[in-house]
Image (cartoon, coloured by chain):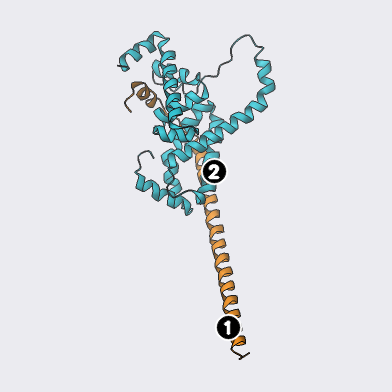
Chain colours: A cyan, B orange
Amino acid sequence: MSGVNRETELGLVAGLRDGDADAFDVVHDAFQTQLFTFLLRLCRRRDVAEDLLEETWLRLVKHARRLRPDTRLGAWLFTVARRVHVSYVRSRVLEDSTVAGLIALWPYAVERASPFEAAAASELQRRIERALASMPLTSREALLLVAVAGLDQSDAAAVCGVSPEAFRQRLSRARAALARTLAESPAGARVLKEVTP
Amino acid sequence: MTDPLFRLLADLPNAAPDPDRAARVRSRCHAVLARGRRSHRKSVRLTDALLAGLGAAYVIEAVRLAWFFSGIG
């Protein structure tokens, strides 16, 4: 858990199991921004990300009494957030199946910009945001969980429901794809040259 | 994190949800926790009462049988 040692985390889990609102507040403050950023980068819509975040927190409190005493809160919360997002995507696929057929007939590509692009501090960050937004969902979530949310690879593998080895390969492919996309622009290639040995 | 590309990703800006909505969600979660706590206490009280009742019935039956077999009843 970010900034909280394992002993404190176990205490927070015990508090949640007892229905302690103070323990919930500590967990909420520790993960709120991380979870929202993760969800927003997955779905790219603020209103949807807020709905999914609310659902994630509600699932935590509804499930609090049944949490295992040794639960790793980060992995648990990101697993739920990811599942909530997958359910959302599935429902959208059903709803949009007719619309998608019509959009496919449109001669120009329809791209949705990442909401982070406007907030990016530099051209490089904008490029990274654009590259991330254009990646397949599985690659994006692998990069976000490890590099942005700071989960270790075994926790991130558990969040995605794959073996650590499969996750390692997925992450490596995602990293290579991101580097390739960045290298396509002269500015990205320059920065890549600076930061990669 | 040693990978330079991952460091670039880690430096990307975060986003925060709408504070009013976040406060509403937090208080909704508090209410769910409080409700769970109350219903847990209630079920513990019910279980305790049930166990006490069963224990009392067992003791009464044991005493009655003891009297019966010893010829007092």
* Residue at x 48%, y 35% (from the top left corner): A159
Within-10-Å neighbours for mark 2: few <14, some 14–19, many 20+: some
Circle 2: element type: helix
The amino acid beneath tag 1 is Val
- Chain letter of mark 2 equals A
Judging by the rendered image, the residue that carries numbered circle 1 is B63
Q: Are marks 1 and 2 on the same chain?
A: no
Circle 1: element type: helix
- Chain letter of mark 1 equals B
Res B66 → quadrant = bottom right
* Residue at x 42%, y 17% (from the top left corner): A176
Q: Is residue A158 above or below residue B59?
A: above
Q: In this view, does B35 lie above or below A73?
A: below
Position of the N terminus of chain B by quadrant: top left
Q: Which label is found at residue A59?
A: 2
Mark 1 vs mark 2: give the one in front: 1
